Image (cartoon, helix red, strand yellow):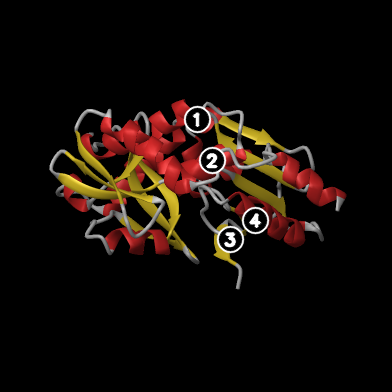
């Protein structure tokens, strides 16, 4: 139990005595007000079928947005500036539909096939490819306040292999910003300071795995329970499997920025999904 308590502490997780925003529908009204202040937003209306969704018209595009992540984040971290977080969310949503994708901001992030399927079901044409297990690589434009999926039509005449190289080179520029917390020994938390949503992208970089060899010279387990964190475990440690599962469970209790509840391996330099 002491091990698991320490693991939970690595999340820098603070539980509020009570929810800061107990009602998501009421919270949504604050977000709608912030959206309506953004340039280019023609309308923002509550979705009557789902208290977490907002139907927005930005420019000439209709889009549905979900506030579950920002709602969960502010309830889990009560010391955060709620007004600033809501404003960032609103600006990011507007920005994602008005900004342009190019080689200078193309990056690769890790998402799930379910994420890809959900967006394609709305008519979006995503530039993506399988990674391992339930994980996929999704190509996005790294904008000042958000990441926005790109489509093949955004890069006419370019092959996926070519764009993969461009995207990974842009991710590599953030390698000096990696932060590592290895307090427990059995697990290291990695994230990218200043661009935490690139944290899951680290598993795509041979340069990252090379830099982690002093801590993990052999095979590793890794989990990506949230989009903004990567946890790596020494596969040779008898407690690694149990600790990895507990890390996933603790993270999923927060309910925001969730990515995958599966455990993965890097064995002999190859990424593998556990059965």
How far apart marks 2 and 4 lie (CA) works out to 25 Å
Q: Which residue is mark 4?
A: 248
**Tag 3–tag 4 contact (CB < 8 Å):** yes
Mark nearer the viewer, 3 or 1: 1
How crowded is the residue under tag 2: few (<14 C-alpha within 10 Å), some, or many (20+)? some
Please tell me which of labels 2 and 1 falls first in the chain. Answer: 2
How crowded is the residue under tag 3: few (<14 C-alpha within 10 Å), some, or many (20+)? some
How far apart marks 2 and 3 lie (CA) works out to 26 Å
Mark nearer the viewer, 2 or 4: 2
Mark nearer the viewer, 2 or 1: 2
Q: Which mark is residue 21?
A: 2
Mark 2 element type: loop
Q: Residue at x 34, y 60 (%)?
A: 49
Q: Residue at x 13, y 43 (%)?
A: 60
Please tell me which of labels 4 and 1 falls first in the chain. Answer: 1
Q: Residue at x 48, y 65 (%)?
A: 134
Q: Residue at x 28, y 64 (%)?
A: 121
How far apart marks 2 and 1 lie (CA) works out to 10 Å
Q: Which mark is residue 82?
A: 1
Q: Which residue is mark 3?
A: 261
Q: Is residue 223 above or below residue 96?
A: below
**Tag 2–tag 1 contact (CB < 8 Å):** yes
């Amino acid at each position: 139990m002491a091990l698991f308590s320490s693991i939970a502490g690595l999340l820098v997780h603070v539980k509020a005595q009570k929810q800061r925003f107990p009602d998501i529908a009421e919270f949504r009204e604050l977000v709608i007000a912030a959206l309506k202040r953004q340039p280019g937003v023609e309308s923002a209306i509550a979705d009557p079928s789902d208290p977490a969704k907002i139907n927005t018209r930005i420019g000439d595009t209709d889009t549905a947005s979900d506030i579950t992540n920002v709602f969960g984040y502010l309830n889990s971290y009560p010391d955060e500036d709620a007004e600033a977080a809501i404003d960032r969310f609103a600006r990011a949503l507007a920005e994602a539909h008005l900004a342009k994708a190019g080689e200078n901001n193309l990056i690769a992030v890790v998402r799930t096939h379910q994420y890809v399927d959900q967006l394609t079901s709305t008519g979006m044409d995503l530039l993506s490819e399988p990674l391992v297990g339930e994980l996929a690589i999704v190509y996005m434009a790294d904008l000042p306040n958000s990441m926005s999926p790109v489509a093949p039509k955004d890069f006419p005449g370019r092959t996926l292999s070519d764009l993969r190289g461009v995207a990974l080179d842009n991710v590599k520029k953030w390698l000096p910003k990696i932060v590592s917390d290895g307090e427990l020994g059995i697990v290291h938390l990695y994230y990218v300071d200043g661009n935490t949503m690139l944290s899951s992208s680290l598993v795509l970089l041979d340069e990252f795995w090379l830099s982690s060899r002093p801590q993990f010279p052999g095979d590793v387990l890794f989990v990506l329970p949230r989009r903004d964190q990567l946890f790596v475990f020494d596969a040779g440690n008898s407690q690694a499997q149990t600790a990895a599962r507990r890390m996933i469970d603790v993270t999923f209790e927060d309910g925001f920025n969730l990515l995958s509840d599966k455990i993965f391996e890097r064995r002999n330099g190859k990424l593998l999904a556990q059965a």
